[in-house]
Image (tube, grey):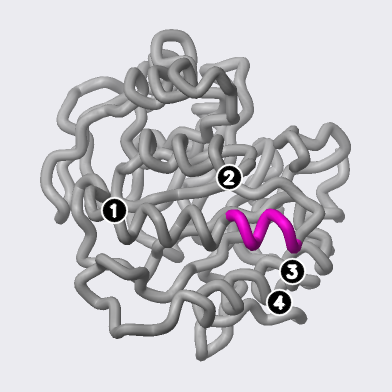
Amino acid sequence: MPVFKFREDRPTLIGVVHLPPLPGSIRYGGLDISTIIDFAVRNAKTLDEAGFDAVILENFNDYPFEARVRRPETIASMAIIAREVIKAVTVPVGINLLRNSGPEATAIAIIVGASFIRSNAYCETVVSSEGILEPVAREVLETMGRLNSKITVLADIFVKHASPLHRQTIEDVAKDCIERALADALIVTGPRTGEPPDPLLVRRVVKAVGAKVLVGSGITPNNVNDYRDAHGFIVGTYLKDEEGQIDVVKARNMVNAVKNLAR
């Protein structure tokens, strides 16, 4: 499987596949796992063929979420799905196991051959509708150590759908996340799914750290130019059609918009 690397010629573009409800989630309706795999593979291939640099799988429809995924059937399902997607695409594949299951996502990623994870509360304590989310950086790194492997960690700061339980500035959190929690890159989001962050906030984080910074919500071809300072974008909501599938025209439009930001 390809190693996840940031592009140097333009911002890196990661497309999100929002999976149907998985076994073990409260909204799981009995959909056969092979049907979910087919959905994931088809949509991931659409992103790959459109020119995205990476794909991330997310259990987006498992809401209401647990703070950490503990049900073995959910973890097993994500592993099987991820393995099949990895075999079907040519780009790096990542995993985000909501709400804050970074260690579990890390184990899945290493075992099935994925390249990176996204962690919503990697280095700070936040309060959310799922309860208090505690930082998982140490557990993620311990999991890598036990499995004798290293994958890339994309860490949210001031994550959407949550509020930090501290009085630190976003710059202080960004520095701690890189310097003390050893994240590989940071993600800045708007307040909710599909809503973009303040461009000034992104610029502040980029200026504060020497690491890569991605915008993790609300990006479309119409506003991507506002975030030229960012090193990458994670795009999900914009890409979907009314049935939750990746729209190939939207995917290509997003790729073309980012290519126009060539450095």
Where's residue 204, x and y in %?
A: 51, 28
Q: CA distance from mark 2 to mark 1?
A: 16 Å
Chain-order first, disc 2 or disc 4: 2
Q: Residues within 10 Å of mark 4 (few under 14, many from 20)?
A: some
Residue farthest to the bottom, as pictured? 242
Q: Amino acid at mark 3?
A: Lys
Closer-to-camera residue (43/73):
73
Question: Which region shows up in magenta?
Answer: 83-88
Q: Specify which label sits upstream in the sequence, 3 or 4.
A: 3
The quarter of the displayed image where residue 1 is located: top right
Kindly report the distance in space between the C-alpha atoms of the residues bearing marks 3 and 4.
14 Å
Q: Are marks 3 and 1 in contact (CB under 8 Å)?
A: no
* Disc marking residue 112: 2
State left or right for residue 152 relative to residue 170.
right
Question: Label 4's element?
Answer: helix
Q: Which mark is residue 250?
A: 4
The residue singled out by tag 3 in the image is: 45
Q: CA distance from mark 3 to mark 2?
A: 18 Å
The nearer-to-camera label among 3 and 4 is 3
The numbered dot on residue 72 is: 1
